Image (tube, rainbow, N blue to C red):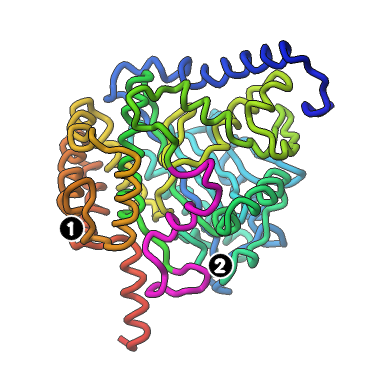
Amino acid sequence: MQPDQMNISGNDAHSEYELNHAMLMSVLTERENSIMADAGERTFTISIERVLYDHTTRTMVRFDGQSGIEAMLGELVSLYPGCVEEWHDGHLMGLSTAASKHLVGCPMIVELGPGGQVICKVGPSQSVVEMLDALQGFDRAVHVASRNLGCDYALLSEGYNSFVDTPLDVPLVPRTKWTLMSAYLSQTGRYARDAMRCACAMHLSLDFSSERDGLAIYRLGTALTPLLMFLTDNVRSFRGSGARRCPNMTRAIIWEEVDPKRCGIVPGTFDSAFSFDRYVEWLEGLSPILATTEDDEVSSTGKRTLRQVMEAGPFSTSQTLHAFDIALPFVRLGESIEFLQIDALRPRMAASICAFVKGLFCDARSVDAVWSMLSFVKESDVQDALFELRLRGWNAPVYGQRVTDLVAKLVGISRAGLQDPTERRLLDEMTELWDFSMVPRDAFIHQEVKANRGW
């Protein structure tokens, strides 16, 4: 029987809600990583969504077919002995080395996004170098797997699928979860299909030791998000636009018109009274879109809010964790703190951004230094920063100072916070671009200009 078919009295509904609310709160307050003594023990996770590219045909690789993504995943399984295969709706859709007794280095999870984006998640780990090794090893494994299929594949690290003129050119991966989400989000914003089928992000997660520690990272991460969007802008083409006609910070534009209720800045983030409980209350006002069971059965929840679903019956562990995934704000709370609005980058650039964020948050002194610059920031200031960066780029005023000055100060804090000299060198991968007032997308513009002029 589905939850909406149950006849539950008001008292019973309230009791069910209270129990489920307590389960949601426990994810934030009673986590295993709460034993972390200080910021110096913080662990990080990198997750990158990328398009699988066929060098021979110069096209994106689709899910099905003799040499499709599913076949490639089958070849990858043989390259990671002891990995756990992830099957959904009768199809192989990922693998995990996290529980493998053969694991060397940091754990890795491979899964698929709704548009066939190949997602590689490495960590948790305290070492950026270790995560970079895992990412680069995965890229080599993809190449070997494609060779075993008689093909020549690579993963394209761009913030938007540059092979398509419309998101409708990209078929959804045949998974009930994505079908239900697409049907719902297609009614909430004009760029929902672009976000699901074509956008490719890097998610950066870090753990936290307490509510005070978590809220400090959460607020600072929200304030820094417009800057991270700008500094990692890596879109070559939007709906066939070409690099020069592609707007600045394309993914920021897309996510503004996906579903305003669940995206952007959580109301009240910068209020002194904001808390984990208020975040969960906001979460409970959203529609979860779908419900999942421990057996991976998926069903639609329609337009009901999460609170209404919580009143209908007890949550499983998977439903509890899924509740946090329904939110898509600048920074998401859950088992870890997740920065969602970074463009997909090549592994070394991704590691560089991870090193940048690690340097800002791995040391209590670094957090205090960043906070001293941004403690006055409110929601309207973050919106203003986003607008100015999209409009003026490197000439934008951000939080009362020139963006170049703010970036230079943050880089200095980050470099001072990194103890590993190799991580400091990784930081240079991106900062050398920023020193010349460039972001990753500028390389695409330069290439396009050269090609058009015959250089």
What is the secondary structure assignment of the residue under circle 2? Answer: strand
- Does 381 sit above or below residue 32? below
Question: Which quadrant would residue 86 be assigned to in this image?
Answer: top right
Query: Which residues lie in the magenta part?
Result: 237-264
Find disc 1 in the rendering and name its residue: 435
The residue beneath circle 2 is 54
- Quarter containing the C terminus: bottom left
- Given this view, does label 2 or label 1 mark the residue nearer the observer? 1
Tell me which label, 2 or 1, sits earlier in the chain: 2
The rendered magenta stretch, by its main secondary structure, is classed as loop
Secondary structure at numbered mark 1:
helix
Q: Which mark is residue 205?
A: none
**Residue 435 visible within the image:** yes
Residue 115 in the image, given as x and y percentages of width and height:
61, 56
Q: In which quadrant will I find the N terminus?
A: top right
The amino acid pointed to by label 1 is Asp
Report, in whole angstroms, how far the alpha carbon at label 2 lies from the one at label 1.
34 Å
Residue at the extreme bottom: 454
Between 440 and 319, the one lying in front of the other is 319
Q: Is residue 262 magenta?
A: yes
